[in-house]
Structure formats: C-alpha cells, structure tokens
Amino acid sequence: MEQPHVIVHPLPVQGHIKPMLCLAQLLSEAGLYTTFLITHHAQKRMANFPALTTQFPNIHFEFISDGFPDDHPRDVNSGFFSDIKIKTKPHFKQFLLSLKKKSENGFSPPVTCIIADGYVVYSFEVAEELRLPTFTFVSHGACFLQAYHSIPLLIQQCHLPFRDDNINYQIQCVPGLEGLLRRKNLPPVCLLNLEADNPSFQEHLKDILGMKRSSGVIINTFNDLEVQCLPHVATHFQKFYTVGPLHAFLNSKIGNDSHLVASHASLWKAEKKCIAWLDSQPLRSVLYVSFGTLARRSISQLLEFWHGLVDSGHRFLWVVRPDVILEEEGENVIIPEQLQVGAKENGYIVDWAPQEQVLAHNAVGGFLTHCGWNSILESIIARIPMICWPHTNDQNINTDLVCKVLKIGIELEAFNRSSVKSTVETLMGSKRKALQKSVDKFANCAQDGIGHGGSSNHNLEMLVTDIKKIKT
Ligand code: UDP
C-alpha cells in the first residue's frame, strides 16, 4: 500500500506556522509522507530556514507565491489576510496540479488529504474542486472557535447586531461559553456590528463556517484546558481532534530540556544574549513581557508601560519588536532610548526573544502577555503565571479563560503606569502562590495529555488512523 501523503498548509504568520510545523513533524514521525507548504515570502523570513530542513529531514518543504508584490506589507492593516483568498488561490491550485503530475510520474505518493489552516479558505475551495479531502487546523482555542460557530445562534436570538454600546454585556445563551462571552470576546467581525444580511459579513461567515464541510477539525488545545466548552464545540464537526499543546508534544518526542525543537520555527531571529542576562538574575525574579507577533502600540502607550514596569521595582525582559510601533506616528519615528534594545537598569529589551527558552528559564517568574493562544500554551507548559493585556481577535476570550476559569493569570484592568505597577506587584508577590498552584495543575494535565495513553496522544493516533483509511 502506498504511503499516505498529507499536505500541511498554514497561514503565513508566526503563530500559525509554528504549531502546524509541529503537527507536520508529528505526522511524519507517525509514518505519513508529509509536505509542508508555505509561501516563498514566509520561507525567506524564517530566520533559520536551512537549519529547519536539516532538523526535520523527513518533511518535504514546498513553496508557493502568495501572489503579492515583494514590497507588500503583508500585515493586518493592508488587507493581506482577506486578499490571500483571491491572490494565493491560483498558486495553490497550480501547486496541487503539478504535484499530481509528479505523483503520476512516481516522484511522490498521490495526495491523500490536505490539512489546511482554517483561515486559508482558498485551500478548501481548491480541494473541493480537485475532490481532495481536507482537515481544518485551528491554531486558537476551542472557546474562540465556539464563539465563531455561535454567530448564527446569536443572530437568531437577536444578540447580533448589538442594540447598545455595552461591549462588556455578558451573552449567556451559547452552550459551553457561560460566563465567558462578553460582547468584546466575540470574533472581530461581530464588533463591526453589521446587519446580519450585510454581504461582507455573510461572506466572512461562509468562509469561516465552511470548515464544517471538512473531514475533521484538528485543534491545538487539550481536553483538561477547555473542559466546559469542548463537548459543545465538537458537535459542529464530523470529527474533532484535540492534539495540543503541539510544541510540547513535539519537544517531548524529540527534544529535551536544553533543546526545544519546536522553538526553531521562527520568522524572526532571536536575541540569544538575553539568556546570558537571565542567567545572572535570581530565581523567579524576572517578568517576561511580550505582545506577540501582530499587536501594535503607540510610543506613548509603550512609554507608559515602561514607567509601570520600572516603578514596580521588578526585573523584566521585554520584547519590543521593531514593527510594534504604530505607523500613524510616522515613518521616521525615533525610538526613545528607554525602548531601545539592550540592558537597562532593571531590565533587558530585545527585539525578538527565544520565547520558549525564556519561559523555561528558572529566572523567569511571570509573563505579561497579549494572550495569544501559543503564548498561553507555552506559559502553561513552562509553569509561569500570567498578566493578560489583550488586544484583539481571540485574545479577549483567552483572557477571560485564563483569569476567570483557569485562574492561572490576572488581567491588567486599566492601561496606565500605576495599574501596570500594581498588577506586576500582585503577580510577582501576593497572588503568586495561588496562581502557581493552578498553573502547575494544568501543566501536569497537559503533560499527561501528550504522554502515552493521554488524550492528545490518543487523538493524534486517531487522526493518523483516519488519514490512513482515506482511499486515494
Ligand atoms: N514569539 C517568540 N519570540 C518573541 C515573541 C513571540 O518566539 O519575542 C513566539 C511565541 O513563542 C509564540 C508566537 O511567537 O509561539 C506568538 O504566538 P501567539 O499565538 O502567542 O501570538 P500572535 O502570533 O497571535 O501574536
């Protein structure tokens, strides 16, 4: 029998490439012929790409054009994420057709199925045209997925569009999201408050909810993390596989403490000097601060933050990405000395950190995060309690999950220096013990899940079995 062949195709951004690469490697280890398809642009940006191919010799890396000119900003504000649907689609289709020829000529097994990122909607359209089965990969948590899939119910029950401005209003009618669904936690498209029959709202819904048609949904979470929501969200799909945390799953298979394999899939070059700085800091004394890969802030916000951190008196390691500063401030913006890369009085600033390695360092005692899903999973695995400062997308619902349900973090309630100061003091001081206890509990559950006989481990096996059953 021919080796089953899966194409794994992520959205070309950091928070999606990394978990999907982890999944690709796990599938390849399970005996599947695995092709990892990314855009040329993403590949060029991957700081250590050549090393990755050596590290994952059994993955077949392939590249397509994203259809945009080289100098396109490819960011949230440029329309990139909606335009890929049209621009990248023909390149994806062309790739599959040429792969078909290759396999007819015996160069690779025929494609069994496509595992596509839920946001790469063209993959599903092309796969349907070419009659190839698909699985959807979800890089955020199950709660946000449930929020997306509750939109038709919310329209039906007249919760959408909103009739007033109270974005903290609690919606109670969604199974599995009781106490978690403030209006502001809904997917951003809902916050535009469009009428239900608005064509662009309808199209967005059709794209996202279209994942129901795929053979199954694979999600980077674990059963004990979203207990309340998982049984409900699973009902939307033919099959539902919780396989996370994927970075820890992969590290546990082929890594060890000093070699975090998953962390190598990075679009930025990590500043390793900060590890030497951490080496000289006392145990659990440092707050690690990062706003993820897409969030942008104004200089005045960043400076306010700076003062809060310094006033807290706690040590900090802060990632200030070069592109974090909001464009409105002008292209020739001068970064204030405080925010420039390097060692500071009580802290250290980097433009990109080896995050997994930082979180695993014993000098780190807390993580101030924008609450991106990967960051949460990485923090849990490293047993680090969090301060949550959400910005957009899934980050608001993630914050409520972390702070209200799991109790492994606290929210930064207001944005000013005194609030930053007092919240840092609380996390690193009085609340530390209680939060640590909870985070330890979930870290243990996560490790059990990816271990032998655990739920994520079992679900990955099920996925592989289901893929092997597909007839080409
Ligand atoms: N990350 C990193 N170094 C940094 C900042 C972030 O390696 O300085 C990685 C982090 O480990 C995580 C990913 O970037 O895997 C961010 O993903 P997340 O889902 O948390 O945030 P988003 O990409 O949505 O901003």
Image (cartoon, grey):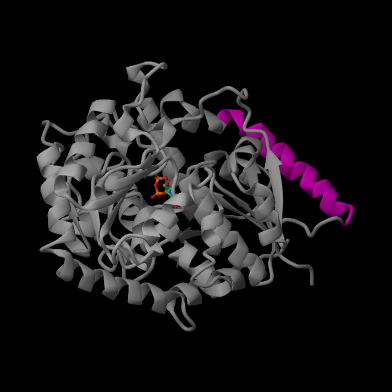
- Above or below, comparing residue 392 to residue 270 in the picture: above
- Span of residues in magenta: 86-106
Q: Which one is in front, 329 or 340?
A: 340
Residue 442 location, quadrant: bottom left
| Residue 170 in view here | no
Residue 281 location, quadrant: bottom left
Q: Assign the C terminus to one quadrant of the image.
A: bottom right
Q: Is residue 468 located in the magenta-colored stretch of the structure?
A: no
Q: Position of residue 378 (x, y in %)?
A: 39, 60
Q: Is residue 1 left or right of residue 343?
A: right
Q: Position of residue 196 (x, y in %)?
A: 29, 32
Q: Is residue 93 located in the magenta-colored stretch of the structure?
A: yes
Q: Position of residue 408 (x, y in %)?
A: 22, 63
| Residue 213 in view here | yes
Q: Residue at 25%, 60% (x, y): give it.
A: 285
- Above or below, comparing residue 28 to residue 415 in the picture: below
Q: Residue at 38%, 33% (x, y): give it.
A: 324
- Counting the numbered discs, the total is 0
Residue that sits furthest to the right in the current view: 105
Tell me which secondary structure the magenta stretch mostly adopts.
Answer: helix
- Above or below, comparing residue 184 to residue 33 in the picture: above
Q: Assign the N terminus to one quadrant of the image.
A: bottom right
Q: Which one is in front, 428 or 471?
A: 428
Q: Position of residue 146 (x, y in %)?
A: 32, 53
Q: Which one is in front, 258 or 102?
A: 258
Q: Residue at 66%, 39% (x, y): give it.
A: 92
